[in-house]
Amino acid sequence: QQGQTVAPVVANLGPLEDLTLTPNPDEVEEVFTLPLAHLLREENQGYTHFRTAGRYSYTLPVFLNGPHKVWGLTAIITELTLELLAPDCY
């Protein structure tokens, strides 16, 4: 939806096993983790090209080959985060 603001937060929350997460089920289908090493492997990185009315429209990142396909806004935020956290590797 247009007009909404998304504010990604990067934080060290400690051991994941110690967390109890209660996401809003209307907004979050599933919570999962992927190792940074997985996201940085070239074979797990790709792009999806979208067309509108038969013409090229835009390209978005996608992260593959894990238990989940990371795409859409989550992939955009992930890509921007990798550019900040690992500029020499991504």
Image (spheres, helix red, strand yellow):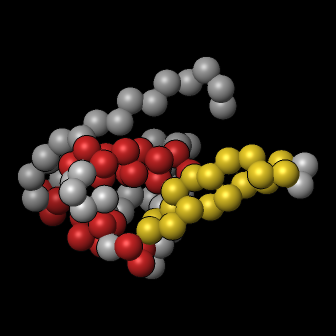
Residue sitting at 30 percent across and 52 percent down?
82
| Total count of labels | 0
Q: State the residue lying farthest toward the right.
A: 53
Most foreground residue, 72 or 40: 40
Q: State the residue lying farthest toward the front.
A: 88
Left or right, 21 with respect to 24, comes to left
Left or right, 72 with respect to 23, comes to right
Left or right, 23 with respect to 83, comes to right
Percent position of residue 81, x then y: 31, 46
Q: State the residue lying farthest toward the left.
A: 14
Residue sitting at 14 percent across and 47 percent down?
13
Q: State the residue lying farthest toward the top.
A: 3
Give above or below for 28 relative to 90. above
Most foreground residue, 78 or 83: 83
Percent position of residue 88, x then y: 21, 57
The quadrant the C terminus occupies is bottom left
The quadrant the N terminus occupies is top right
Q: Can the viewer see residue 17? A: yes
Residue sitting at 51 percent across and 62 percent down?
62
Percent position of residue 89, x then y: 24, 62
Left or right, 26 with respect to 50, comes to left
Give above or below for 43 relative to 58. below
Q: Can the viewer see residue 67? A: no
Percent position of residue 45, x then y: 44, 68
